Amino acid sequence: MIRILLVDDHPTLRTGLANVLGCERDFAVVAEADDGSTALSLCRQHLPDVILLDVSLPGMDGIETLEKLRAEFSQARVLMLTSSEAAEDVRHAFRAGALGYISKEVRRPELIAAIRAVARGEKAISESIARALADADEESTISRREIEVLGLLRQGFTNGEIGRLLGITERTAKAHVAALLLKLNAADRAEAVARGFERGLLKP
Amino acid sequence: MIRILLVDDHPTLRTGLANVLGCERDFAVVAEADDGSTALSLCRQHLPDVILLDVSLPGMDGIETLEKLRAEFSQARVLMLTSSEAAEDVRHAFRAGALGYISKEVRRPELIAAIRAVARGEKAISESIARALADADEESTISRREIEVLGLLRQGFTNGEIGRLLGITERTAKAHVAALLLKLNAADRAEAVARGFERGLLKP
DNA sequence: GGAGGGATTGGCCGAACGGCCAATAGCCAC
DNA sequence: GTGGCTATTGGCCGTTCGGCCAATCCCTCC
């Protein structure tokens, strides 16, 4: 018997999942949560075999929830669910100890197969996500520092301000911005920010 | 009997909806579509009483689908479903003839009530959406032209290029950009683009 | 028919931006 | 340990940006 905890903020989607999963004789949805902290306490109560975790949650987001879950239950087997295909999110999730990462768009059989795989301790990645990861690899990698700078560009800071905020020279800030423009193939910081949102580096 | 057409690109969510709706004796889900053109042809086939239409669809988006549906079936009663609360989307939807607009986060009873209301030809707006609309009213309204300019800022165009693209002077383009910065409370075009994404004026 | 708001344009100016070239130091992987 | 990548900094320069002030035309709402 595979005991499952559902974590998603959309009640209807949870119903759909519960319904789909309920059709499998060896699946049992033992609890449902609509946010990260509820997920944590329910996990303590039920110690599920598999946790289906939405990436975007209100308050504490999916990745953060994943980190806390893994910190407390290092053996927790987590399958991330997502609506978008942001390569950086996927990487973060795996780094934080997720076992699987699949799109909500997948059909029933794929979903079921992914859950079984994760329950066995195997990895599971849906095809669209794998493709997004491959695409991201082709493009140049954006460094952590650059993502940090991108976050400041988003807030309308000038190069000088970015330098001050990061404790570096305006020159260096400029260099980071230039690197961002190049890697994101953007003409100016406005387009860089747009690309950030398009790629999921920045979140609304 | 209320005959319903479901339009959403997430199979699991559709399952959930079908499940929730199936519990009501006077509801019948007569068809499901995962994109706009399928929705159109299914609508021709089944002439449903109510259409549940997701705002974000692959290819032709929800609003566009709505427009085509209304153009062909002017009596169509459409209830929009959304994951985000972008005030501009809501306005566009109502202008395009939607009868209702609710968040996917709503609980079962609210959803059912909204569908019954729309089936009777009444409007239905979920609380969170109404709040978003109210918030948007407090802020200054962004004109169509400005949204157009925002779309160009996103693509990294300079004021001069924007002028050329819109057939206006650089001066005027500058004026539009300045208006955007003011209304979006942004320090520069990069932040303006970010605010555009945050508000749902721009879509990834 | 008048009021209000959006779209349009003008000039001026200091600050910020982005491009190009080059160099040093630190860290990870092979 | 050596190559490759990132982070850091420097100078120089033409272009672009954003702010401030003011004016006209057109459409819609009352």
Image (cartoon, coloured by chain):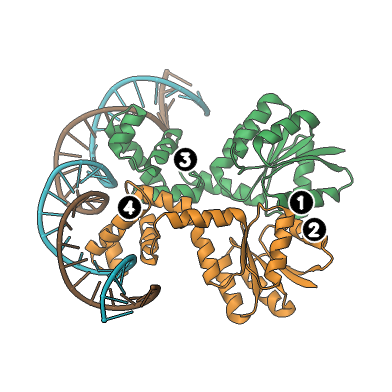
Chain colours: A green, B orange, C cyan, D brown
**SS category of the residue bearing label 4:** helix
Of badges 2 and 4, the one in the foreground is 4
Q: Is residue B50 above or below residue B204?
A: below
The reply to the same-chain question for discs 2 and 4 is yes
Q: Which of marks 2 and 4 is nearer the N terminus?
A: 2
- A87 horizontally vs A148: left or right: right
- A101 horizontally vs A114: left or right: left
Residue contact between numbered discs 1 and 3, judged by CB atoms under 8 Å: no
Residue found at x 42% / y 33%: A145
Per the rendering, the mark at residue B19 is 2
Of badges 4 and 1, the one in the foreground is 4
**SS category of the residue bearing label 3:** loop
> Viewer-proximal residue, B172 or B77?
B77
Percent across and percent down for residue B92 are 51, 67
Per the rendering, the mark at residue A141 is 3
The amino acid pointed to by label 2 is: Asn
**SS category of the residue bearing label 1:** helix
- Structural distance between the alpha carbons of marks 4 and 3: 34 Å
